[in-house]
Amino acid sequence: MALLEWSAAILGLLSLGQAAAKPEVKAESSLVLASGKPTIVMFYGEALAPTGLVLKLPLSGRLIATKPTEGDSKKRGSIQVEAELTAGALPVPTAVEVGLQHVGAVVTRSLVALPAGFTVLQVKRPNQTPAQAMTLSDSRIAVTGALNADSPDIFRFHAKAGDTWEIGLFAGSLGSALDAMVRVRNPRRASIALLGGSEKRDRHLSLTAVSDGDYTIELTDAESRGGETFRYVLTVMRVETTRR
C-alpha cells in the first residue's frame, strides 16, 4: 500500500471512534545521525499516520513508509514510520528535531547529529567500577545507552597533555528522564570536573588534559534512578592539541 493510501486508511479508522487517538512516538531505531550520510530511522508508536516531515536545517530527509509493526518491535508500538534523514556538516554533536506531520498536529522526537568521523557504540556492561570502565579508543566516539538505577556507567579514554576534548551528554533534549551527573577524573583518580544541576538537561564540558594518561567519565542520575526511560548519548571528541 502506498504511503498516502496507508495514512488515509489510518485516519479513516481513527475517525470512526468517538475521539481520535493522539499520535505518539514511543521509540526509535537510532538516537544518532551521521553528518552527510543518509540514515534510515524507524519511529515506533501508536496512532501514527504522518503525511510528511517537518525539519529544520541542518537536517533534511523524506518519509518512506508507514506500516504495522511486526515481530519483536511490537512492544515498542503497533505502528512504525520509516524515514530517511541526513544531517548537514556540523562542527560538534548537536541535538536536532524530527517532526512527523499529522493532520492538526506535529509529533516531534530529538536525535543527535554527529560530525564526520564518529564511531557509534552501545554501552557495554559491566562498567560500574574504574577497573571495568568501558574503553573509548577513538578520538571521536558516541555511546548510546540507558542508565541503570543501582550503578554508574564509567568510561575511560586516553589523553596526552595539551589535548583538548569536548564531552557531551545528551539526555534532556532527547526527552530522557535522566537528571545527569557527569564527573571526570584525571589519571590519578582525582575529580577535575563535575556537571549537574536541578534541571533535566544536557551537559557539556571542554577539557584540556594537563598530563598524559587515562581519564574517566562517571555518569549517574542525581537521584540514583534508572531504567529504559533514562536514556542518553555520550559524545567524546578530541578537538585541539596545544603541545609544545
Image (spheres, rainbow, N blue to C red):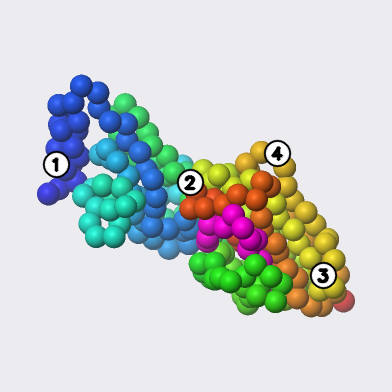
* Magenta stretch bounds: 144-156
| Residue at image location 83% in from the left, 62% down from the top | 191
Most extreme residue toward the front, as rendered? 150
For label 2, the SS is strand
Q: Does residue 162 appear in this view? A: no
Q: Which label number is shown at residue 189?
A: 3
In three-dimensional space, the C-alpha distance between marks 1 and 3, rounded to whole angstroms, equals: 60 Å
Q: Which part of the image, by quadrant, shows the C terminus? A: bottom right
Q: Looking at the image, is mark 1 or mark 4 earlier in the sequence?
A: 1
In three-dimensional space, the C-alpha distance between marks 2 and 3, rounded to whole angstroms, equals: 34 Å
| Residue at image location 14% in from the left, 37% down from the top | 9
Amino acid under disc 4: Ser
The residue indicated by pointer 4 is 198
Q: Looking at the image, is mark 2 or mark 3 earlier in the sequence?
A: 2
Query: Residue 49 lies in magenta, yes or no?
Result: no
The image quarter containing residue 210 is bottom right
Q: Nearer the viewer, residue 89 or 7?
A: 7
Q: Looking at the image, is mark 4 or mark 3 earlier in the sequence?
A: 3
Circles 1 and 2: CB distance less than 8 Å? no
The residue indicated by pointer 1 is 5
The residue indicated by pointer 2 is 110
Query: Callout 2: few (<14), some (14-19), or many (20+) C-alpha neighbours within 10 Å?
Result: some
In three-dimensional space, the C-alpha distance between marks 4 and 3, rounded to whole angstroms, equals: 26 Å
Relative horizontal placement of residue 216, taking residue 98 as reference (left or right) = right
